[in-house]
Image (tube, grey):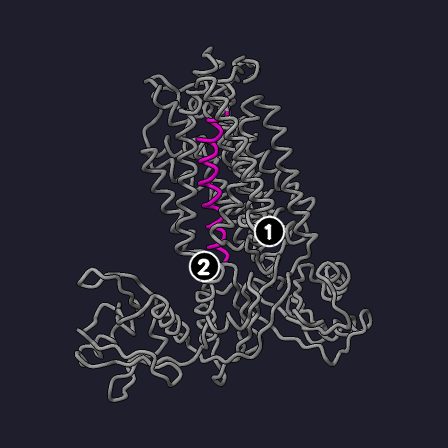
């Protein structure tokens, strides 16, 4: 790169950082378009709308309630993936939608959940709402090429059979769609519909088609509901929680910048500038795509910043290797980026596959996690392979060409005999996993639950209290929550303010009658509350069984696709199976950590486990990429064990540095964050340590054992001393 172009590149990079920084911090125009303050925040950070529905039907069954809750969950995800739907008492359903403040507008858009029937002209009901799996507005073209809009209906298995019979008998006649006794559409049957998919066409605008689809969706509930109450609720966490988390992110970034510059000199400075751009782009994308951000989401972004360092570490480790061989700075930079490409692409694509599957198959927080993960992966690849490269070559182009600016000479490390200790590593891993299962068994036998399930998984008690003053969120956290924790023994209390009143909703673990009375008495004694005005209801988990099943199915499918991709890229199924086995190992170890520490298993549990899955597979790919490269140079006398030991040793610095920088980001968050963030950060720190351990000590050894036992024997035995 010529000097003029290099100067221009650095100037443009500086302008880009400044402009995006201005956009993120201040924004443009009167409304501050693009500003971080305009990012859509979740219930925990900004509050939202809470709507409670009463079931009209007498004595609804658990199955009917569960099915209705799940369908409503799918319905409200149009507003935010972080929306939650849960049961209150025996016959009420509560919906909480973050980032909105107009309850009436939500109620109008959501529709009134009532009865839905499909009737023939003679009044015979051929379908009900429970037969409809989904309904959505679709755009297309008519025979003349003009744009037209329709409603696509997908029926379940039972509905498919019933509709096939009805349409076959009523070709040329109308089948009316009746919602709460009112005809909302009367399409004419053109032909028998036997495949379970039907289209309602007409002279629709998109809004009309979308409204019709919305009405059919909401009418597809098993139970009829009526609105009982709606409130605008405040944030669950105070400004202090948000500010400390943001400060943690800034401090973590500064530490990483200093570390990268100290270790990699000028390339470290280039990667630090690229990381600033990375952070700014992620925040702008969150704003542009209106993604709801919760406090665990902030933690996820901070974690992804730590993981974004990985690509830069891989690149600069390669550059140093080339310079150690005696190559010039320029050639080392070019070769380093080229050789790092496959490891970076394979690792990130593998994780991106997981994110895509989680997005399509998951629901609720799983979808939200998948969004953030995918954004982080794509942006980190772009900044590492494009921005970092541009900046580092620009530095070289303007005259920073001395070798001293790029690396300190080191002797090539003698390969460490990791495989010689493989039996010890395997035994330690099995012991830790076994301890986890034993602890879960003991806790379960004592009636305490295998894991410390929180509100999100187990449900609890929602207590509504009318105070004599309007407490702020921070005052609630500092004054009211400690009293509740002392009485109930629950250290994961969730609170919400009801806008326009002095009411506070307190959510705890399920309280028995004597605990409720003790809590009421404590609130009366400490805050002068009138006990007779306190109301309490048991609530179900916000993560329904169906959502858990969605998450499990999504993870299984994602694992299969990752396995297939690794198999395809590395041309050896043993790479894939050992990678997935190590991934399972990391998940089980972190599960053991949850069991032993009794950290609450709540909404962040799924995000934590999924983060570890993505982190673990990425670390493994880097080592496998090096083994694959070394295998190209093997001869008939090459000892396979030496190849594996050499590959792990060559990537050891990368493994340590990446684990360290990611750990630092999460550790700062743990030290400075509020209790809910600590519960997210602690198992993540355990997962980072475990991921680093498994990638270095387990994955290579697993592949070697499979290669030797399942494939061909090594051509010659080396000095693999035990």
Q: Residue at x 41, y 24 (%)?
A: 339
Q: Decide which of tag 1 and tag 2 comes sooner along the chain.
A: 1
Q: Is residue 248 left or right of residue 577?
A: right
- Closest to the camera, between mark 1 and mark 2, is 1
Q: Residue at x 50, y 30 (%)?
A: 12
Circle 2 crowding by C-alpha within 10 Å: few under 14, some 14–19, many from 20: many
Mark identifier at residue 90? none
Q: Is residue 397 left or right of residue 152?
A: right
Q: Is residue 592 left or right of residue 504?
A: left
Q: Nearer the viewer, residue 413 or 174?
A: 174
Q: Which structural element holds mark 1?
A: helix
C-alpha distance separating marks 1 and 2:
26 Å
Q: Position of residue 638 (x, y in %)?
A: 37, 18
Q: Which structural element holds mark 2?
A: loop
Circle 1 crowding by C-alpha within 10 Å: few under 14, some 14–19, many from 20: some
Residue to which mark 2 is pinned = 363
Q: Which residues are magenta?
A: 364-391
Residue 116, picture quadrant:
bottom left
Say if 74 sits above or below 556 in the image: below
Say if 337 sits above or below 579 in the image: above
In the rendered image, residue 389 lying in the magenta stretch gets the answer yes
Q: Main secondary structure of the magenta part?
A: helix
Q: Is any part of residue 452 visible from this angle?
A: yes
* The N terminus - image quarter: top left
Q: Do labels 1 and 2 touch, CB within 8 Å? A: no
Q: Position of residue 429 (x, y in %)?
A: 54, 40
In the rendered image, residue 383 lying in the magenta stretch gets the answer yes
Mark identifier at residue 37? 1
Q: Is any part of residue 435 visible from this angle?
A: no
As drawn, the residue found furthest toward the top would be 326
């Amino acid at each position: 790169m010529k000097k003029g172009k290099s100067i221009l590149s650095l100037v443009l990079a500086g302008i880009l950082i400044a402009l995006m920084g201005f956009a993120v911090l201040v924004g443009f125009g009167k409304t501050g378009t693009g500003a971080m303050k305009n990012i859509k925040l979740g219930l925990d950070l900004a509050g939202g709308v809470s709507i409670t529905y009463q079931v009209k039907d007498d004595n609804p069954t658990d199955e009917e309630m569960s099915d209705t809750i799940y369908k409503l969950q799918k319905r409200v995800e149009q507003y935010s993936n972080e929306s939650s739907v849960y049961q209150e008492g025996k016959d009420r359903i509560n919906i909480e939608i973050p980032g909105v403040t107009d309850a009436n507008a939500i109620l109008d858009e959501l529709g009134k959940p009532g009865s839905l029937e499909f009737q023939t002209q003679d009044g015979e009901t051929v379908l009900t709402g429970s037969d409809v799996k989904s309904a959505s507005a679709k755009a297309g073209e008519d025979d003349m090429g003009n744009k037209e809009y329709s409603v696509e209906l997908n029926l379940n298995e039972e509905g498919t059979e019933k509709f096939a019979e009805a349409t076959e008998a009523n070709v040329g006649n109308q089948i009316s769609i009746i919602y709460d006794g009112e005809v909302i559409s009367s399409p004419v049957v053109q032909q028998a519909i036997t495949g379970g998919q039907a289209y309602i066409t007409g002279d629709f605008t998109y809004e009309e088609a979308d409204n019709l689809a919305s009405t059919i969706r909401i009418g597809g509930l098993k139970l009829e509901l009526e609105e009982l109450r709606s409130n605008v609720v405040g944030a669950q966490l105070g400004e202090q929680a948000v500010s400390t988390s943001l400060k943690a992110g800034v401090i973590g970034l500064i530490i990483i910048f200093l570390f990268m510059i100290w270790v990699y000199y000028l390339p470290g400075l280039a990667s630090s500038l690229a990381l600033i751009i990375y952070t700014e782009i992620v925040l702008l994308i969150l704003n542009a795509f209106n993604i709801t951000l919760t406090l665990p989401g902030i933690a996820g972004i901070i974690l992804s910043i730590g993981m974004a360092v990985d690509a830069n570490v891989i690149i600069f480790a390669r550059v140093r290797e080339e310079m150690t061989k005696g190559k010039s700075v320029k050639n080392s930079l070019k070769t380093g980026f080229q050789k790092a490409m496959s490891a970076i692409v394979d690792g990130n694509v593998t994780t991106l596959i997981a994110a895509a599957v989680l997005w399509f198959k998951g629901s609720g927080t799983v979808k939200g996690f998948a969004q953030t993960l995918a954004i982080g992966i794509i942006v980190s690849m772009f900044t590492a392979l494009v921005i970092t490269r541009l900046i580092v070559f620009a530095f070289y182009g303007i005259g920073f060409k001395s070798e001293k600016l790029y690396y300190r000479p080191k002797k090539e490390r003698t390969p460490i005999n990791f495989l010689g200790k493989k039996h010890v590593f395997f035994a330690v891993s099995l012991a830790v996993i076994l301890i986890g299962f034993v602890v879960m068994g003991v806790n379960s036998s004592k009636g305490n639950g295998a894991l410390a399930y929180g509100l999100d998984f187990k449900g609890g008690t929602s207590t509504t209290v009318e105070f004599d003053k309007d407490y702020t969120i921070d005052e609630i956290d500092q004054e009211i929550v400690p009293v509740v924790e002392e009485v109930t023994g629950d250290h994961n209390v969730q609170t919400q303010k009801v806008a326009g009143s002095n009411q506070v909703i307190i959510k705890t673990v399920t309280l028995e009658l004597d605990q409720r009375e003790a809590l009421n008495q404590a609130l009366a004694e400490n805050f002068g509350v009138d006990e007779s005005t306190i109301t309490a209801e048991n609530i179900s988990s916000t993560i329904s069984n169906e959502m858990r099943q969605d998450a499990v199915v999504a993870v299984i499918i994602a694992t299969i696709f990752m396995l297939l991709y690794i198999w395809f890229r590395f041309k050896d199924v043993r790479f894939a199976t050992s990678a997935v086995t190590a991934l399972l190992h990391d998940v089980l170890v972190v599960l053991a950590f949850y069991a032993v520490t009794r950290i609450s298993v709540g909404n962040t549990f799924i995000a934590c486990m999924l983060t570890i899955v993505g982190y673990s597979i990425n670390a493994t790919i880097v080592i496998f990429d090096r083994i694959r490269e070394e295998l190209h140079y093997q001869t008939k006398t090459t000892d396979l064990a030496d190849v594996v030991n050499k590959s792990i040793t060559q990537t050891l610095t990368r493994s340590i540095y990446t684990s360290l920088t990611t750990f630092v980001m999460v550790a700062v968050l743990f030290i400075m964050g509020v209790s809910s963030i600590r519960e997210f950060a602690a198992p993540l720190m355990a997962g980072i340590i475990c991921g680093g351990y498994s990638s270095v000590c387990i994955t290579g050894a697993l592949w070697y054992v499979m290669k030797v036992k399942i494939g061909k024997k090594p051509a010659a035995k080396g000095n693999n001393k035990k």
